[in-house]
Amino acid sequence: MANVPAELKYTKSHEWVKEEDGLYVVGLTDFAQDALGDIVFINMPEEGDDVASGESFADVESVKAVSDVFSPVSGTVAEVNEGLIDEPALINQEPYEQWLIKVKDVSDTEELMDAAAYEEFCANEEA
């Protein structure tokens, strides 16, 4: 089973989110990076861009495919993890250490799952 930290919240499109100092921090789950395979490129939004809950804000390219990354919240991009643009493979190595964006002025959150619900969701997807 994929690594699922208990303190995070999760989406059905395999993003993780945590609230930190009033910002929502968003990244890709271990399940997502494992399903994608080796990530070779990431296309990120700009600081100040608006993101909408359930809509794509970035895409990751792996050796297998290009996949959209969906925002679990609506708000404004406060910060982008620029380091991933140069080294996208860090997501494969440490998916829960490598956040993609931090979102401020959050007005809407997608239906987020706790770790137990997400583990059950992943187990059903693998079945």
Image (cartoon, helix red, strand yellow):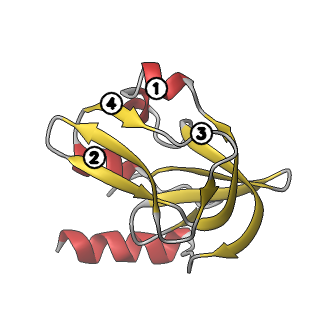
Q: N-terminal of the two: label 4 or label 3?
A: 4
The image shows residue 7 at horizontal and vertical percentages of: 65, 59
Q: Element under label 3?
A: loop
The image shows residue 93 at horizontal and vertical percentages of: 40, 30
Above or below 86: residue 53: below
Q: Element under label 4?
A: strand
The residue at which mark 3 appears reads as 46
The residue at which mark 4 appears reads as 41
- Asked whether the beta carbons under mark 4 and mark 3 sit within 8 Å of each other, the answer is no
The image shows residue 50 at horizontal and vertical percentages of: 63, 57
Inter-mark Cα distance, 3 to 1: 12 Å
The residue at which mark 2 appears reads as 34
Inter-mark Cα distance, 1 to 2: 19 Å
Does residue 23 appear to the left or right of 39 in the view shown?
right
Please tell me whether mark 1 or mark 2 is closer to you in this view: 1
Q: Quadrant of residue 109?
A: bottom right
Question: Mark 4 Cα within 10 Å, few/some/many (few <14, many 20+)?
Answer: some
> Considering depth in this image, is 35 or 26 the residue closer to the camera?
26
